[in-house]
Image (cartoon, rainbow, N blue to C red):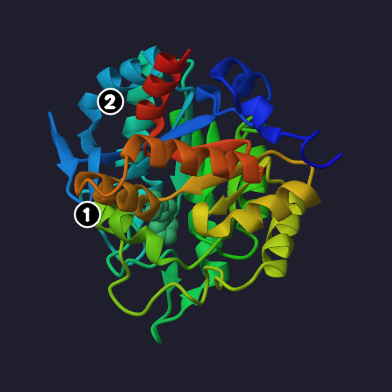
Amino acid sequence: MPYPESRPRRLRRNENIRRMVRETALRVEDMIYPLFVVPGQGVLQEIPSMPGQYHLSVDRLPDTVKDLRALGIPAVILFGIPSRKDPQGSEAYDDDGIIQRAVRAIKETEEEILVITDVCLCEYTDHGHCGWVTPDGRVDNDATLELLALTALSHARAGADMIAPSDMMDGRVGTIRRALDQEGFADVAILSYSAKYCSAYYGPFREAADSAPRFGDRRAYQMDPPNRREALREVALDIEEGADIVMVKPAMPYLDIIAAVREAFHYPVAAYQVSGEFAMIQAAAQRGWLDGRRAMMEALVGIKRAGADLIITYAAPEVARLLREME
Ligand code: PBG
Ligand code: ZN
């Protein structure tokens, strides 16, 4: 029946009614918080392009994860800035590397917090590409796979619960899965950056992680933004290769991809609200151009509504506090 019998506003009259009919809920249990780990002692340095986010040295991690646990945040994803970079990114798979030490430090303090490690080479290579670069300047897919497997294994030995390959080489999920299984890490899960687009929104991260390519760009391995069907093929391949959770990245400009992946596959879907998405909201809020908290909550609930089960977000601590206040 149309108006005047139908009045959708009846269910918006007050907060009690709105809550009853609310279709999507943000939950702190679904949040994964990124941490940037740097060499040194006592380092707690704000990242200029990411207000409220910090470079942390390993000795700072125990206090940080205690705070995160107190807020109910279940998981962190770690990114490392090594003390030395070289053409083959060797600190990525050094058992005494920055991430390996970080994982051990976290697990010694908070056994239960889920530690996810980003597996890629771009923070560790002097050329800033995500893989092995040939003399003619191409990123060699198959030569990279072995280095990624070494990295994943080294993270697993340090105690990582979940491995998140972000390099976009073909075949990396299967290579990592086989390596983990062979070495007795069958329980270590893979959260694959399956549909990772070649995006301008990674800008602040690359500054924070010092991982911008020194020449060229990542278009020969990350996905072309206009492509949707290709995202579904990427996800299908990762699932066949053994991914436990599939991810779409970035989130807000790719909500249609999140929805399509949710619809097509019966696997948990993660979305990464990336550094540029975070920085845009912070920057506009600092200028008083919008209400930063509301804009952030709206962006995140939109990502959930599109179909994401899990969200990697720099706003996780703030969201945890806001959700608590709203209870
Ligand atoms: C490394 C990696 C990147 C991000 C996560 N892992 C950057 C890139 O691919 O250049 C981006 C995360 C963000 O922007 O918040 N491959
Ligand atoms: Zn990379």
Residue at the farthest right position = 1
Tell me if the residue at label 2 has its CB under 8 Å from ligand 1. no
Checking the image for residue 61, the label placed there is 2
Q: Nearer the viewer, residue 151 or 47?
A: 47
Q: Percent position (x, y) of residue 69?
A: 40, 16
The disc labelled 2 sits on which kind of residue?
A: Leu
Q: Position of residue 158 (x, y in %)?
A: 43, 31
Which residue occupies 56% across, 64% down? 169
* Residue 318 in the figure: left or right of residue 234: left
Write down the residue under mark 1: 84
> Is residue 208 visible in this depiction of the protein?
yes
Can residue 154 be seen in this snapshot? no
Q: Which amino acid, mark 1? A: Arg
The N terminus is located in which quarter? Answer: top right
Residue 208 percent coordinates (x, y): 25, 51
- Foreground residue, 254 or 77? 254
Residue shown at the point (30%, 65%) measured from the top left: 212
